[in-house]
Every structure is written in structure tokens, then in C-alpha cells.
């Protein structure tokens, strides 16, 4: 509320300064008779006319002249909408105001802020103008844009004349008019510390208990006022209505809270002195006035509250006492005041941390020194086993660490996780604290409960300089924790390239595998840190290390699963393979080795056949050679015979018959040569055909071999895929079972959970028995029909005949039964008592489908779905198939007669039961 007051005052002052700044030269030049300068003023001030200038300067002659010449400008506003009458009020020009009012200016005309001339007169505290305007009919109830009336603005000054004048014009019910923030004139008067105004308003029966938009009463505003008369105002309100002393606002704060927050000790004394004043009242954050005094560092008010019974041990929503906040903000004087009282004890908060530990964690050296002088236990621990030295090291306050070490704090004190202060400093990257602890003799070879060293924690935080410092003091960069992980893997997990460079420069092995087979490259690829991956490859990291788990994933697999495409592309360029590619290569090698093994195995069996085949080939070659030799000899013999016979024949023919063209012998010789030529051509053709046949057989054999190879390879791939699926399914079931067994063994209430599972098993067995019994009772009288059964086909034909000729076919499987009572339509959705019992058992106790229960199910994820495998009972599938068949039969009978439709009306009861259970 005070801010709004200052803003209005500043606006008024600025506007009047601009106007009055023009007044000086304007008046001087007008006295010299220069009228041209008035036009310059109009140009400088937007919307300000000559009538405005005359009104603010009090020049009645000029104003009268302007009224006569420019009557239409009587109510003209400037850039803020203020008329000449408002200028007269702001400049206290009573005679000019009277002149304007006689000329007929509008007395209730408002500016852009919604304020009239009466508002500004009340704001300025001008009693004469106030009387004048009221006599001219000014509306005293009119509100501005903030909802404030004339009475609200009158409280901003200490003029009692204006207040009395306004109160005489108002009825008792109109005094408590509220503005837009639901504040009355009494709120404003109390906020300014105007005692006389408060007296007058209370005398006129103004309501003291009205809360504003923040729930504050006039007492709240008076308590937060810094005016010297504010204590008198508070005392006056409390004497009138003492019951409001403990009234809280909408944030739970009483007047005492606000007085303490402003450090107004005089008002605090007045509030404490009232009977029934609640010194330890709690606000919405469960903080008392003593909390406020401690956090703001008011030692005098703290001493005053403690002397009057303030609760030093009251804890707020964070479990912190006032001493915690005083220590946190390094208010050493306030802490010293607390410690002078013997009843004050350093109570721990909800985490078990005392105010001394809060001071250590915030680096409040002065407060730490004050505590140490009062013989505080320097080794006190919180619920996690941490000391003040742990808190100071975690926050990085080297000066506080030195103070604690100089006063005997244990430098290697472990917490519940076996973390020393050096671990905390390394984790958060406080280099100066690490160096201080090492200089004071902190051990660098200490391990926590997971087997990690301080170098692991520095690498997890990516603090390269701390890693270099720890290695300098003898920490092994290849040291493994209980999971087999090295500091390099911790740095690769976060992608801290500088830290990785430091570790690998000091001989950290990038190919080390943890207990699950993961390397630093696995972690970098899984998180998509491309720079870290490149750095590891530069230091000769092997890209195809596989996990020791069932999946056997490689770094490339992690990059692909995380959709880190840039990392995956780089890894492929570096020759990385996924587990699928490795399995393909392994499958090819296995197939090749298997083929060699089969060849070697069958070679002994085929050796005899091969030897016999070779022998037969040799015998066939020998026979062919003998045959060829014989043929050659026969040919040679024939040629020799022909040669011997040729001369005698020629001589005889020459002597006896010289002119015969041919003889029989010549014809025989030509016939023999033609025959040989023909045999030679036939042999060449046979050789050509034989060679073509051999090539064709060779191609066929090769094609068959390739086909067999592809079939074997495809079969091997299918076997591998099926085996992998089987192993993965088996591994998932075993993992979930192991996890559930482990949880049952470790968590409390395992015996009760087993009893619940046993109860569920009984429920399921009962349900199964009941369903089978129902099916057995229905089976003798009913039979499952299919669309292709002869009975159904005959029924369709008869239905068609009836449709055409009006014949009604009998229903062969319908049996008379008593008429069932009519049931409403909605009853089919109401489950039976047995179904409700079964559903309750499943929802409550079943380890695979329950979402609620006394213990969390190890088989269900947070969304309520099964883990790793699908729960699909076989019996429900069978019933679903039966339901589909019955629906199909019903659809086929839809056009049949009413008697045929009795089949759908007498469907087996188990389907209704299934719907109810579902």
C-alpha cells in the first residue's frame, strides 16, 4: 500500500514540476508583455492551453479573457486529462477556481486517473478549496480508477480540518467504503501513522476488523508503519479493539510478525505488552515472530521475545528453529543472544542437522566461531552421518573448513555411505577445499561402501584439475569399484572430455570392462557423447567389445538404441559392428567350419567309392587306349595293303585298258576314304557333344550346391533367431522371478504377501472349477455348430424356403425350458457375487495384474502393465474364440424366423458370465 502512495505522490510531483517549471519563464515573460511565449509553452506541454497556464499561474485577468474568448476550453484536459480547475486546485489558486466555477466549468469532471478536482483538493489537504468544491455540488462519493474516494486520499496528510469536513458530509455506513484492494480510509490512515485521523475515524464507528485483499486489518498496516507516531496509532487501535491483536492475514501473519519484519522495536514492545498477545503465533509456513527476527538479524527483538516467553524450539515446515536461520544468515550477534540463554538448545531439523551444521554448510564463519566458543560438539552428525565439516566441504567454503580443522574436526570422518569430506569436495568440484583437506592430511586412498575412490567421484563430476591432483597424490587411475568400473568409465558416462584426457594421459586403460562387460566406449555411446567417443578411439579403444549379459550388446548397439545417429555413423566409419553383424559373421564361420567338418567326416566313407571311381576311370582310359591302338593298327594295315596293291593294278590298266574312266578297284578306294572321313566327323561331333554335356553337368552341380548352401544358411539363421528369442524370454522370466524373490526376502511383510498370494491361488482355482462345472452342465444338451455343418446348411435352406413359401423349419437342437423372468437391459452389465469376489481377488492380490495392494508387485511396472512378458491366459483365449463363433452363427440366423432366433436367446450362460467377470 505504501508503494501506491509513493507512486501517486511522485506522479503528482512530476506533473506539477513540469507545469511549475513552465510557470517561471511564462510569468516573467507575460509580465514583460510577451504573449508569443505562451504559444511556445503550449507546444512544449502537450494539451496545455492558455487557460491552463493562466489557471496555474493565478493570472485572473488572462483567465477571464480566455474564458470570454475560449468558452469551449473550460473543461479541456491536458495529456493527463486534467482541466484548468484541477490546475487551480493543484497550484492552490482559490480565486481562479472561483472564477472558473462561476463560468460554469464541470466540477465533477475526472482526469484519466478517474480523479476529480475534489480528489486533488483532498490529496493536497486544501481545506478552502475543499469547502468551495463541496458548496458547488462536488460528488464526495465518486471513486477514481483505483476505487479510492475523497476520504481515502484525505488520509495521506495530517490535516484534521479536511477530515472533519468530509466526515460531516458522510453517513456512518459510508465511512468504510473500500477501494479495489478492499482497503478503507482507516487502513490508509493507519498505514501513514496518522493518529488524529485514526481517532476521528474510530469515533465515527469505522470498522477496525475489516480485512483487505491480503487479509490485513488496520492494525497490520499500523504495525508495519515506520512513522514515529505509529506506536501511538497501534496503541489506539488496541485500546479500542484488543481482540484483533492475534488476527492473522491470509498468509497467517499477525501484526507482531510484520512489526518484527520491519525491525520496529517500539511497536513490538507495544504488541507484546497487550494481554493475551500470542508471541509464538505461527504463519502458514509455521514460523513464529522469533523466526522472523532471527532470519533478519534483529538481536534486540530476539532478546525481547525470549524474555517474554518466545518459543525458541518451534520448528517451521522445514523443521528449522529460529537459531537455524540466524546461523544460516551469519548473524553472529543474534546467535550470541540465543546462546546467552541457558534454556536455548541447538535442536536438529528433520534431517538431523543442527544450527551449527547449517552455519558450516553456508560458510557463516562468524557464527561458527561463536558456536565453537560456546563449546559445541564439533563431531555431531545428522541422520546421514555427516558432520559440519562434510557440509562445509560439500558447499565449498574453504575458510570454514580451515576453522573446523583448526579446532580439531576429524578430517576423515565417514558418513553412513562411508563418504569423507574429501569425497564431498571432489564430487562438487571445489578445488580449494580439496587442496586444503589434502594439505591437512586427508587420506586419498579411502573407499566408500560401493568401493569407489575419491577419483571416481571427481570423474563423475567431470573435474579434471581435481583428478590430476588426486593422481598426483597416488590414486590409481585404473582402480575398480565393486561393480568393476574405473574412473574413466565414470567420466565417459558424463562425456567429460577434459577429465578423460587427464585419466588416459596417466595410463588409464580405455578397454577395461566392468563386471557386466561394459567399457568406457559403451557408456559414451549410450549417452551420445560424440567428442568422448572420438577421444576414446584416438587412444585405441576397441570398438567391438561385447557385454557379458545375455544380449551381448556392443557400443554401436547402444548408440543405435539411443538414436544417437552421429555417434552411430562415426562408429560405423571406425569399423564398429552391432551384435547382429557379429552374429552373422560368427554364423558364416560356423557354417564354413561345419561344412569342413562334414566333408572330413564323410571323406572316409567316400574314399573307397572315390578310389573305385578312379580305378574304373583308369580301366576305361586303358580300354580306350587299347581300342584306339587297335584301330590305328587296322588302319595302318589297310593302308599298307592298299599301297602294295596299287602299282600292279595301275600297270595292268595302263597296258590293257588305257581309256576306261574308272575301274572297280578305284571305286572301292574312294568308298573307303569317304567312310574314313565320315567316321572322323562322327567322332569329332561325339567329342563336342560330350564336352557340352560335361559343362552342363558341372553347372547343374554348382547350382545345386549353391542352393543347398543358401538353404542351410537360412536354416541356421532361423535356428539362431529362435534360440535367441527363447533365451531372451527365459532370461526375462527368470529375472522377474529372481527380482520378486529378492524383494520378498528383503522387504518387510513378505510373509503376509505370501499369504495373500495363497489366497489368490485358492480364488483362481475355485473360479476354474466353477467354470468347468458350468461347462459340463451345459455340454450334454448343447453342441457347438459351425457354418459348414450340414445341420446349419440345411437350416439355412429351410429358412430360405420359409421366406419364399412361408414354411417354418423346425429347430433340431431347441429344448423346451421354463420361461425365464424378464430382466432389465442393464442387468447384463451387473456382475454376480462370484465375479465380484474373483475381480476383487485379482485386483487386490494377483502378482501379475494387481495395481494396488499392501505391497508393490514385482511383476507390474508403475503404469500397471506386466514387465517383460505378456499375461494372456489360455482359457480366456478359448472363451473368446467360442464367443466369436457364436456371434457368427447369430449373424447367419438374423434373417430367419422367430423360432430360429431362439438359439441366440438361449446362448450358453458361460458367455454372460465371461462378460460379467470382464
Image (cartoon, grey):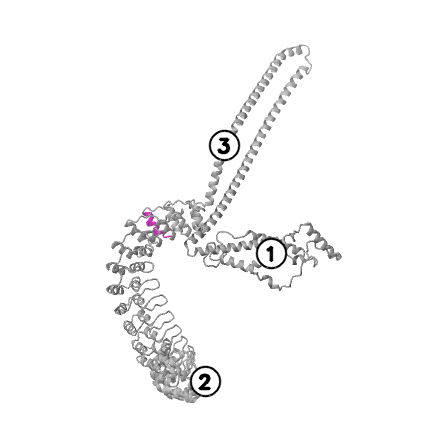
Q: Nearer the viewer, mark 3 or mark 1?
A: 1
The quadrant holding residue 626 is top right
Residue underneath mark 3 = 601
Label 2 crowd (10 A; few <14 / some 14-19 / many >=20): few
Q: Secondary structure at mark 2?
A: helix
The answer to whether mark 1 and mark 2 are in CB contact below 8 A is no
Foreground residue among 423 and 641: 423
Side of 877 relative to 361 (left or right): right
Q: Which mark is residue 110?
A: none
Looking at marks 1 and 2 on the same chain, the residue that comes earlier in the sequence is marked by 2
Q: Which residue is mark 2?
A: 72
Disc 1 element: helix
The image's mark for residue 910 is 1
Disc 1 to disc 2, how far (Cα)? 95 Å
Q: Is residue 420 left or right of residue 878?
A: left
In the rendered image, the quadrant that contains the C terminus is bottom right
Earlier residue among tags 3 and 1: 3
Question: Does residue 8 belong to the magenta stretch?
Answer: no
Residue 320 x, y percent position in the rendering: 34, 66
Label 3 sits on a secondary structure element that is helix
Amino acid at each position: 500500500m505504501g508503494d501506491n502512495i509513493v507512486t501517486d505522490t511522485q506522479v503528482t510531483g512530476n506533473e506539477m514540476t513540469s507545469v511549475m517549471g513552465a510557470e517561471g519563464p511564462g510569468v516573467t515573460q507575460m509580465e514583460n508583455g510577451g504573449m508569443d511565449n505562451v504559444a511556445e509553452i503550449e507546444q512544449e506541454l502537450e494539451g496545455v492551453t492558455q487557460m491552463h497556464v493562466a489557471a496555474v499561474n493565478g493570472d485572473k485577468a488572462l483567465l477571464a479573457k480566455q474564458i470570454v474568448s475560449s468558452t469551449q476550453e473550460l473543461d479541456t484536459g491536458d495529456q493527463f486529462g486534467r482541466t484548468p480547475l484541477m490546475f487551480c486546485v493543484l497550484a492552490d489558486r482559490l480565486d481562479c477556481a472561483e472564477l472558473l466555477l462561476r463560468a460554469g466549468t464541470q466540477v465533477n469532471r475526472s482526469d484519466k486517473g478517474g480523479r476529480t478536482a475534489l480528489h486533488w483538493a483532498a490529496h493536497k489537504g486544501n481545506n478552502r478549496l475543499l469547502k468551495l468544491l463541496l458548496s458547488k455540488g462536488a460528488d464526495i462519493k465518486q471513486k477514481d480508477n483505483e476505487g479510492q474516494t475523497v476520504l481515502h486520499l484525505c488520509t495521506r496528510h495530517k490535516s484534521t480540518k479536511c477530515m472533519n469536513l468530509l466526515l460531516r458530509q458522510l453517513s456512518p455506513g459510508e465511512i468504510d467504503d473500500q477501494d479495489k484492494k478492499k482497503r478503507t480510509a482507516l487502513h490508509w490512515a493507519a498505514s501513514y501513522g496518522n493518529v488524529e485521523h485514526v481517532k476521528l475515524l474510530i469515533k465515527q464507528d469505522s470498522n477496525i476488523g475489516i480485512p483487505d485483499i491480503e487479509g490485513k486489518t488496520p492494525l497490520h498496516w499500523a504495525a508495519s508503519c515506520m512513522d514515529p507516531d505509529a506506536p501511538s496509532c497501534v496503541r489506539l487501535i488496541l485500546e479500542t479493539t484488543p481482540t484483533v491483536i492475534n488476527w492473522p492475514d491470509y498468509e497467517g501473519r499477525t501484526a507482531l510478525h510484520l512489526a518484527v519484519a520491519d525491525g520496529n522495536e517500539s511497536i513490538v514492545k507495544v504488541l507484546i505488552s497487550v494481554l493475551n498477545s500470542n508471541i509464538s503465533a505461527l504463519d502458514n509456513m509455521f514460523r513464529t515472530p522469533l523466526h522472523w527476527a532471527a532470519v533478519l538479524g534483529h538481536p534486540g527483538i530476539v532478546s525481547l521475545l525470549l524474555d517474554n516467553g518466545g518459543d525458541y524450539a518451534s520448528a517451521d515446515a522445514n523443521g528449522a528453529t529460529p537459531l537455524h536461520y540466524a546461523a544460516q544468515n551469519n548473524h553472529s550477534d543474534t546467535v550470541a543472544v540465543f546462546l546467552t540463554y541457558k534454556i536455548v538448545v541447538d535442536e536438529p531439523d528433520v534431517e538431523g542437522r543442527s544450527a551449527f551444521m547449517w552455519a558450516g554448510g553456508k560458510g557463516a564463519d562468524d557464527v561458527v566461531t561463536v558456536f565453537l566458543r560456546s563449546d559445541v560438539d564439533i563431531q555431531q552428525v545428522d541422520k546421514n552421518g555427516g558432520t559440519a565439516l562434510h557440509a562445509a566441504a560439500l558447499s565449498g567454503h574453504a575458510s570454514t573448513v580451515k576453522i573446523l580443522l583448526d579446532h580439531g574436526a576429524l578430517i576423515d570422518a565417514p558418513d553412513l555411505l562411508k563418504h569423507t569430506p574429501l569425497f564431498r569436495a571432489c564430487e562438487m568440484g571445489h578445488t580449494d577445499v580439496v587442496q586444503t583437506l589434502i594439505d591437512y592430511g586427508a587420506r586419498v586412498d579411502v573407499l566408500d561402501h560401493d568401493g569407489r575412490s575419491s577419483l571416481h567421484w571427481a570423474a563423475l563430476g567431470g573435474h579434471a584439475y581435481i583428478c590430476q591432483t588426486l593422481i598426483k597424490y597416488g590414486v590409481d587411475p585404473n582402480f575398480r569399484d565393486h561393480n568393476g568400473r574405473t574412473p574413466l568409465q565414470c567420466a565417459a558416462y558424463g562425456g567429460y572430455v577434459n577429465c578423460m584426457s587427464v585419466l588416459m594421459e596417466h595410463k588409464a586403460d580405455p578397454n577395461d570392462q566392468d563386471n557386466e562387460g561394459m567399457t568406457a566406449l559403451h557408456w559414451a555411446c549410450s549417452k551420445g557423447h560424440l567428442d568422448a567417443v572420438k577421444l576414446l578411439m584416438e587412444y585405441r579403444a576397441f570398438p567391438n567389445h561385447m557385454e557379458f549379459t545375455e544380449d551381448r550388446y556392443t557400443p554401436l548397439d547402444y548408440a543405435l538404441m539411443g538414436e544417437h545417429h552421429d555417434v552411430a555413423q562415426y562408429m560405423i566409419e571406425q569399423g564398429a559392428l552391432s551384435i547382429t553383424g557379429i552374429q552373422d559373421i560368427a554364423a558364416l564361420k560356423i557354417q564354413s567350419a561345419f561344412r569342413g567338418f562334414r566333408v572330413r567326416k564323410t571323406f572316409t566313407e567316400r574314399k573307397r567309392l572315390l578310389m573305385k571311381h578312379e580305378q574304373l576311370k583308369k580301366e576305361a582310359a586303358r580300354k580306350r587306349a587299347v581300342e584306339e591302338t587297335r584301330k590305328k593298327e587296322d588302319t595302318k594295315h589297310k593302308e599298307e595293303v592298299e599301297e602294295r596293291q596299287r602299282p600292279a593294278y595301275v600297270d595292268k590298266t595302263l597296258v590293257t585298258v588305257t581309256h576306261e574312266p574308272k575301274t572297280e578297284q578305284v571305286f572301292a578306294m574312294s568308298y573307303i576314304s569317304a567312310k574314313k572321313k565320315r567316321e572322323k566327323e562322327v567322332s569329332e561331333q561325339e567329342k563336342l557333344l560330350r564336352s557340352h554335356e560335361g559343362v552342363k553337368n558341372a553347372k547343374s552341380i554348382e547350382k545345386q550346391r549353391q542352393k543347398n548352401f543358401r538353404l542351410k544358411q537360412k536354416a541356421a539363421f532361423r535356428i539362431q533367431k529362435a534360440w535367441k528369442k527363447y533365451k531372451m524370454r527365459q532370461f526375462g522370466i527368470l529375472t522377474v522371478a529372481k527380482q520378486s524373490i529378492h524383494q520378498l526376502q528383503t522387504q518387510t511383510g513378505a510373509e503376509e504377501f505370501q499369504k495373500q498370494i495363497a489366497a489368490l491361488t485358492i480364488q483362481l482355482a475355485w473360479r476354474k472349477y466353477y467354470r468347468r462345472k458350468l461347462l459340463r452342465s451345459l455340454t450334454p444338451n448343447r453342441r457347438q455348430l459351425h457354418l459348414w455343418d450340414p445341420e446349419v446348411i440345411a437350416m439355412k435352406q429351410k429358412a430360405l424356403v420359409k421366406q419364399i413359401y412361408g414354411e417354418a423349419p423346425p429347430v433340431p437342437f431347441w429344448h423346451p425350458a421354463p420361461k425365464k423372468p424378464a430382466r432389465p437391459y442393464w442387468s447384463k452389465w451387473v456382475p454376480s457375487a462370484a465375479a465380484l469376489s474373483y475381480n476383487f481377488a485379482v485386483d487386490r492380490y494377483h502378482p501379475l495384474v494387481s495395481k494396488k495392494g499392501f505391497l508393490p508387485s514385482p511383476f507390474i511396472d508403475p503404469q500397471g502393465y506386466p514387465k517383460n512378458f505378456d499375461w494372456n491366459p489360455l482359457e480366456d483365449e478359448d472363451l473368446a474364440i467360442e464367443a466369436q463363433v457364436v456371434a457368427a452363427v447369430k449373424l447367419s440366423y438374423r434373417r430367419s424366423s422367430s423360432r430360429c432366433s431362439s438359439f441366440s436367446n438361449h446362448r450358453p450362460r458361460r458367455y454372460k458370465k465371461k462378460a460379467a467377470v470382464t
